Amino acid sequence: MIPRNKWLLLAMMWFVAGAYGLIFRETTSADAPPFPHFDKMAHGLLFFVQIWLLCKTYLHENKHIPLVALTIFALICAVASEWAQAAFTFTRQADVWDGVADMVGAMVALYLAKQIENVRKNRMNTKA
């Protein structure tokens, strides 16, 4: 069960904004990236923040972070967003490397959240 707190609300808002940016907002020639592979960084950051916010819902409540479930969620979102870009947009296409960047961002967020969870757990054990 996902804890219901402000972090969940922020995660849901970020999800909607990300879906809009990836799928529903068409790019134009004026939207040229500022440097090569900028889109990979944007994908990684988008997924990092999404998964970080979901991890925060658990950290805020001092609950165990469901790493496997969040990894599966990130993978489903990465595949679905790339498929949707190919299927529903005219100016975007599916890119395996975008999906890789998505997963790298998600894994970094999970790693950092797990480290924080471990530090908190160790502090609790040393106080007892």
Image: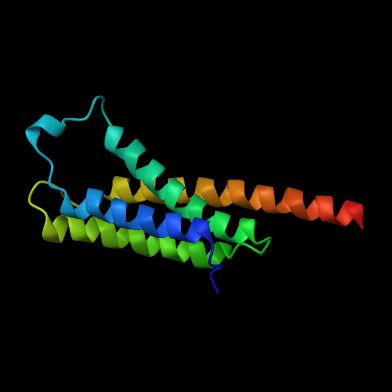
**Tag count in the figure?**
0
Residue 26, given in percent of the width and then of the height, sits at 12, 47
Which residue sits at x=86%, y=56%? 125
Residue at horizontal 75 percent and vertical 51 percent from the top: 120
Among the 4 quarters of the image, the one containing residue 12: bottom left
Q: Residue at x 10, y 46 (%)?
A: 91
Asked if 17 appears above or below 44 in the picture, the reply is below
Task: Give the side of residue 75 with respect to residue 33, left or right.
Answer: right
Which residue extends farthest top?
A: 35
Q: Position of residue 47 (x, y in %)?
A: 40, 49
> Depth check: 50 or 36 in front?
50
Residue under the point 60% across and 61% down:
58
78 is higher (above) or lower (below) than 31: below
Classify residue 92 as left or right of residue 51: left
Quarter occupied by the C terminus: bottom right
Q: Position of residue 13 (x, y in %)?
A: 37, 56
Residue at the extreme front: 6
Question: Is residue 7 left or right of 18 when viewed as pictured?
Answer: right
Q: Position of residue 2 (x, y in %)?
A: 53, 69
In what quadrant of the picture does the N terminus appear? Answer: bottom right
